[in-house]
Amino acid sequence: MKSEFTYTTVTNRTYPYLGISINGVGTTIVLFSAPNTGIVVGVSSESLNKIGAYSESWAESVFMIFEGEVKLRNE
């Protein structure tokens, strides 16, 4: 599966929302459904995370709110 995304960030968190983390090992976008809980919906090629990965222990403080577009497609 591939994903493409563009974004701007905002500051208020209301669930559900998309969060983006950009760090030294890539970019990850998570659809948060509750505090620290969500599923990966977008990654850069360098990211260690995979699309579809679910966790109830994301470090939500390292994610900024993502306002943009995520396109998912099967390949």
Image (cartoon, rainbow, N blue to C red):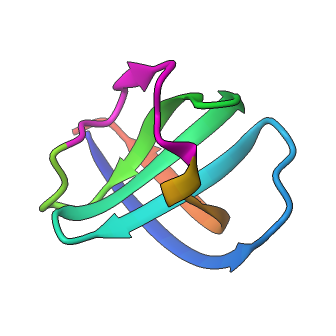
Residue 42 sits above or below residue 55 on the image = below
**Residue stretch rendered in magenta on the structure:** 49-60
Q: Is residue 58 magenta?
A: yes
Closer to us: 9 or 51: 9
Quadrant the C terminus occupies = top left
Q: Whole-percent x and y of residue 7?
A: 58, 76
Q: Position of residue 18 (x, y in %)?
A: 64, 50
Q: Is residue 11 magenta?
A: no
Q: Residue at x 69, y 30 (%)?
A: 35
Q: For residue 65, what is the image quadrant? A: bottom right
Front in this rendered view, residue 55 or 41: 55
Count of marks, rendered view: 0
Taking the image as shown, residue 55 lies to the left or right of residue 63, namely left
Q: Main secondary structure of the magenta part?
A: loop
Which residue ends up furthest to the bottom in the rendered image?
8
Left or right side of 36 for 54: left
> At 79% from the left edge and 69% from the top edge, which residue is drawn?
11
Residue at 82% from the left image edge and 37% from the top image edge: 15
* Image quadrant in which you'd find residue 49: top left
